[in-house]
């Protein structure tokens, strides 16, 4: 069985197209949350994922914010106001049917392979509590301690990670929209158990970043300055980067 796990597309459909082309025809695609908000093409991203022959969805924190209508009653200026304005713009782009659909996505999914795995957007404790490459083993172990499956696959941080603990293996697929490791190539995880044991491969692909940047400008996307910086440089803007590195509680819009 071959399974592709991808997360944090954030409405970058051009990156998603490149990821899916590279994945070929896996038996299953797990779309692991934060799929729509902030990028220029949320409706196209959702349509492409829904058209896949075998796909399972997991809800991320920013998907939940769309359902909770987080953009309402927020500050009227500053970068946070722009971020929440983007949520409203995204909800309008995908329409009521799209919002109803993502409201059905579960918090996590189990995938039965040679080593059964649990796929969750950020961590098993919450959709906005991240598991980072720098999270201490003791803390990481606590976050996954209630998971029965041996392997936990996550996203949310936009950073690749493959950690082996005493009981669990924790893998992050990075980001299929815009990574934060200063490599602009989108990433995803390809899992294969054809040999009787689980093989996990992080894949990186190239796509037309400039075309995605033109999409941002052409569609007058709220929060575009921040998203464009992240697409170009594959990292957070400097004013956000320090807080990101220090915290295990990370969201785009909190």
Image (cartoon, helix red, strand yellow):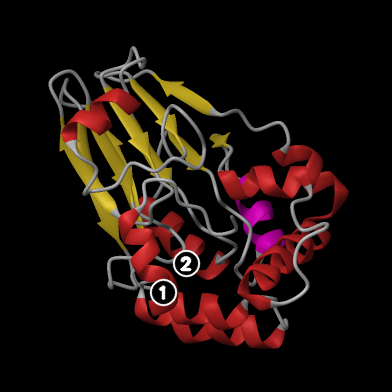
The image quadrant of residue 190 is top left
Asked whether residue 186 is in view, the answer is: no
**For mark 2, does the 10 Å Cα neighbourhood hold few (<14), some (14 to 19), or many (20 or more) residues?**
many
How far apart marks 1 and 2 lie (CA) works out to: 6 Å
Task: State which region is magenta.
Answer: 42-49
43 magenta-colored: yes
User: Is 33 included in the stretch rendered in magenta?
Assistant: no
Q: Which residue position is annotated with label 2?
A: 15
Left or right: 213, with 130 as reference point = right
* Residue 4 placement (x, y as % from top left): 38, 42
In the current view of this chain or complex, which residue is farthest to the top?
148
Circle number at residue 27: none
Q: Report the quarter where the N terminus lies.
A: top left
- Residue 88 point in image, percent of width and height: 78, 62
Q: Residue at 43% across / 66% down in the picture?
A: 178
Camera-nearest residue between 232 and 26:
232
Q: Is residue 73 visible?
A: yes
At 70% from the left and 67% from the top, the residue drawn is 86
Q: Which mark is first along the chain, 2 or 1?
A: 2
Question: Mark 1 near mark 2, Cβ–Cβ under 8 Å?
Answer: yes
- State which quadrant residue 167 falls in: top left
Q: What is the secondary structure assignment of the residue under circle 2?
A: helix
> Could you say which disc has been placed on residue 207 in the image?
1
The local crowd at label 1, few if under 14, some if 14 to 19, many if 20 or more residues have their Cα within 10 Å, is some
Of the pair 43 and 73, the residue shown nearer to us: 73
Relative to 219, 143 lies left or right: left
Q: Is residue 89 above or below residue 78?
A: above
């Amino acid at each position: 069985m071959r399974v592709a796990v991808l997360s944090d597309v954030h409405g970058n459909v051009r990156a998603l197209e490149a990821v899916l082309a590279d994945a070929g025809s896996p038996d299953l695609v797990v779309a692991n949350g934060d799929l729509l908000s902030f990028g220029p093409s949320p409706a196209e991203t959702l349509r492409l994922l829904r058209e896949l022959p075998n796909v399972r969805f997991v809800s991320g924190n920013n998907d939940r914010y769309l359902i909770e209508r987080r953009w309402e009653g927020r500050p009227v200026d500053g970068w946070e106001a722009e971020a929440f304005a983007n949520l409203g713009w995204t909800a309008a782009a995908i329409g009521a049917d799209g919002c109803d659909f993502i409201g059905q996505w579960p918090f996590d999914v189990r995938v039965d392979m040679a080593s059964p795995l649990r796929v969750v957007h950020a961590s098993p404790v919450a959709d906005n509590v991240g598991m980072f490459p720098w999270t201490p083993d003791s803390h990481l172990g606590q976050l996954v301690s209630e998971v029965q499956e041996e392997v936990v696959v996550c996203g949310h941080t936009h950073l690749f990670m493959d950690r082996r603990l005493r009981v669990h293996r924790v893998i992050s697929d990075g980001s299929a929209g815009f990574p934060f490791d200063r490599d602009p190539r989108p990433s995803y995880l390809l899992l294969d158990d054809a040999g009787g044991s689980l093989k996990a491969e992080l894949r990186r692909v190239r796509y037309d970043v400039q075309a995605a940047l033109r999409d941002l400008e052409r569609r007058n996307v709220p929060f575009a300055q921040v998203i464009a910086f992240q697409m170009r440089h594959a990292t957070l803007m400097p004013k956000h980067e320090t807080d990101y590195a220090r915290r295990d509680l990370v969201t785009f819009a909190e």
